[in-house]
Amino acid sequence: VVLEKRRGYGRAFKTGFENATGDVIATTDGDGTYPIELLEGVMDFLVRKDLDFVSCSRLPLQDSASMRLRNLIGNVLMTAAASVLWLHYFSDVLSGMWVFRKTCLARLNLRSDSWNFSEEIKIEAYTKLGRGFSEYKIPYRERLGETKLVPWKVGIQNISYMMAMRTGTVSVVRGLLKRP
């Protein structure tokens, strides 16, 4: 366990990455929704396909009860937006389970310390790693406990961040999102 005193979803991941000692990094949210027992299969996929980054896709859901309808709609809309903006089919741009080679981090420009980190890392992996990026279908489970995010607020921030990534204005949008 690595203690990170600074706030932020993305900040926590980046601190974890900096402290990781292995050649391959696996991530998952801590809410019980992701099937960590499938990590060996995801790793095998990464190695067998000679990939650098694998994003585990929850969509389409295998169990419709595993995600609230509003969250599902938000995930589908954000994923569709990313697919249109980057002219690449993403099946789940907001998944919190990824497996990747630590060496690929040096090629990714990861700036977000917030919720938008989830889409940023996958979009960066796709744009910078090309064929080294892929998605892997996983089942998703019902969340243990309540989510901390405010869906509409996070959704607006996510779409704004994606637009800024696409137009190269991330620093401007990051400044606006930090204002009270």
Image (tube, helix red, strand yellow):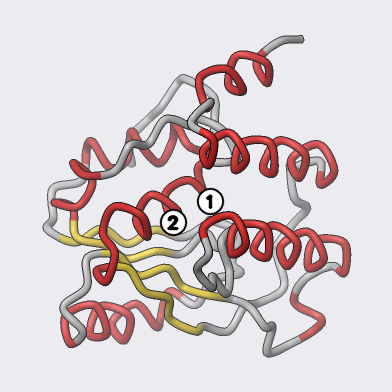
* Amino acid, disc 1: Glu
Q: How crowded is mark 2: few (under 14 residues within 10 Å), some or many (20 or more)?
A: many
As helix, strand or loop, the secondary structure at mark 1 comes to helix
Q: Nearer the viewer, residue 3 or 111?
A: 111
The location of residue 57, given as percent across then percent down, is: 53, 75
- 5 versus 59 height, above or below: above
The location of residue 21, given as percent across then percent down, is: 13, 48
- 178 versus 4 height, above or below: above
Q: Which of 19 and 136 is in front in this view?
A: 136
Q: Are marks 2 and 1 in contact (CB under 8 Å)?
A: yes
The residue tagged 2 is 122
The residue tagged 1 is 119
Q: Residue 53 carries which label?
A: none
The location of residue 43, given as percent across then percent down, is: 25, 78
Residue at position x 68%, y 36% in the image: 160
Quarter of image, res 50 = bottom left
Query: On the rendered structure, is 132 left or right of 15?
Result: left
